[in-house]
Image: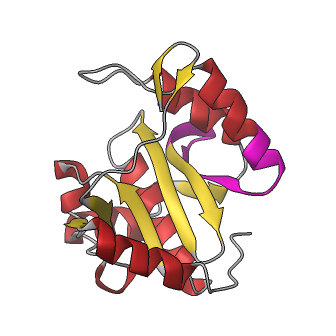
Amino acid sequence: MAVEPGDIQWFSPDPRGIIPLDSFHLPSRLARVIRQGRFEVTVDRDFDAVIRACGSRQDADGSWIDAEIIDSYRVLHRRGFAHSVEAWRDGSLAGGLYGVALRGAFFGESMFHRETDASKVALAALVERVRARGYRLLDVQWVTPHLEQFGAREIPRRRYLRLLDAAMQVEATFV
């Protein structure tokens, strides 16, 4: 996380936020949006646009995604570790998310939306993808009210480290 320009720090929150893959909750309204096919979902089609959009998003504390973070994740993307899930509407990027895939764990980093439900559709597609490929852990770092609606919960670091260790024993590929 970039705290100040040129000052990247590692954060390991305790408790840690995860979305349990076996109990992901898809709200019925969002399920309808997905069934209606309002968004086209792609993977790694425009990683740069997704991370730039996440970096330009301003919340109460501003964005932690500065140019150095963006450059670092671009390198991880080129090396096959960082990935994006995009939601498109009428040919325009409407929302998406990005994160890092390592063995059987996916570490969600950030998401954004320009249209209602676009980032939620991307998240649902991410969960479907990692489930289908045998992932064991979806790390969201911190639980927010937005993520709670999908079943995100906090777990103590000790439990998180056990789940992480089990996920690192799994051979899973994102693409």
Q: Nearer the viewer, residue 2 or 87?
A: 2
Residue at 21 percent across and 67 percent down: it is 153
Asked where in the image residue 171 lies, by quadrant, the reply is bottom right
Q: What residue sits 70% from the left and 41% below the top?
A: 46
Residue at position x 24%, y 68% from top? 156
Pick the quarter of the image with the C terminus.
bottom right
> In the rendered structure, which segment of residues is drawn in magenta?
75-95
Splitting the image into 4 quarters, where does residue 6 fall?
A: top right
Relative to the observer, which residue lies in front, 39 or 96?
Answer: 96
- Left or right: residue 119 versus residue 167 is left
Membership of 85 in magenta stretch? yes
In this rendering, the answer to whether 37 lies above or below 136 is: above
Residue 108 in percent (x, y) is at: 48, 54
Instruction: Give the image location of residue 14, x and y in percent.
Output: 26, 56
171 vs 78, left or right, is left
How far across and how far down the image is residue 148, in percent? 19, 60
Query: Which of the 4 image quarters holds residue 21?
Result: bottom left
Q: Is residue 93 left or right of residue 121?
A: right
In this rendered view, identify the residue nearer to me: 72 or 47: 72
Query: Is residue 29 among the parts visible in the rendering?
Result: yes
Q: Residue at x 48, y 40 (%)?
A: 10
Residue found farthest to the front: 158
Q: Is residue 74 within the magenta segment?
A: no
Above-or-below relation of 22 to 79: below
The vertical placement of 137 against 70, above or below, is below
